[in-house]
Image (tube, rainbow, N blue to C red):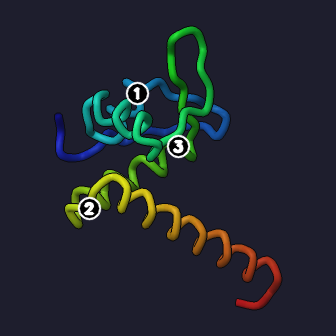
Amino acid sequence: MRDEPLSVVVLDDAFLTAAQMASACAVHVDWVTGHVDDGVLTVTAVVGAEWLFSVRDLQRARRIRQLERDFDAGPELAALVADLLEEIGTLRTRLRVAGLV
């Protein structure tokens, strides 16, 4: 697989298949399915036998992959850090909206 992910433009209401998600994260499909099986990534929808992922799922997968690669983190640790970073982002947005930042 490539070292760098493909540059993709994804619309907010678009969905990606597991193969598209893997390509966008520069990983094999097995990485995506393994992370879903381990509960690290979630599937947004299932159509037939095809898993579909949202833009938010893609952002999370890319962040987890980056943490695994850059810090040699295990999937569970990378997911925990991703959760914390997402929560920090949410809290910062709430502070900005409230005019406190």
Q: For the residue carrying disc 2, how many other residues have a C-alpha within 10 Å: few (<14), some (14-19), or many (20+)?
A: some
Q: In the rendered view, tell whether residue 86 sits above or below residue 93.
A: above
Pick whichever, 101 or 63, lies toward us: 63
Q: Which residue is mark 1?
A: 20
Residue at horizontal 47 percent and vertical 24 percent from the top = 17
Callout 3, which amino acid?
Asp
Q: Which type of secondary structure does the marked residue at label 2 adopt? A: loop
Q: Which residue is mark 2?
A: 73
Pick whichever, 67 or 97, lies toward us: 67
Disc 3/disc 2 C-alpha distance (Å): 19 Å
Name the spot of residue 5 as percent of width and height, x first: 29, 43
Q: Which type of secondary structure does the marked residue at label 3 adopt? A: helix
Q: For the residue carrying disc 1, how many other residues have a C-alpha within 10 Å: few (<14), some (14-19), or many (20+)?
A: some
- The reply to whether callout 1 and callout 2 are in contact (CB within 8 Å) is no
The outermost residue toward the right is: 98
Point out the tag, 3 or 2, that comes first from the N-terminus: 3
Disc 3/disc 1 C-alpha distance (Å): 12 Å
The outermost residue toward the bottom is: 100
Q: For the residue carrying disc 3, how many other residues have a C-alpha within 10 Å: few (<14), some (14-19), or many (20+)?
A: some
Q: In the rendered view, tell whether residue 79 sits above or below residue 58.
A: below
Residue at horizontal 55 percent and vertical 33 percent from the top = 43
Residue at horizontal 28 percent and vertical 56 percent from the top = 74
Residue at horizontal 41 percent and vertical 34 percent from the top = 37
Disc 1/disc 2 C-alpha distance (Å): 24 Å
Q: Could you say which disc has been placed on residue 57 in the image?
A: 3
Callout 2, which amino acid?
Ala
Where the C terminus falls, by quadrant?
bottom right
Callout 1, which amino acid?
Gln
Name the spot of residue 46 as percent of width and height, x first: 59, 20
Where the N terminus falls, by quadrant?
top left
Q: Nearer the viewer, mark 3 or mark 1?
A: 3
Point out the tag, 3 or 1, that comes first from the N-terminus: 1
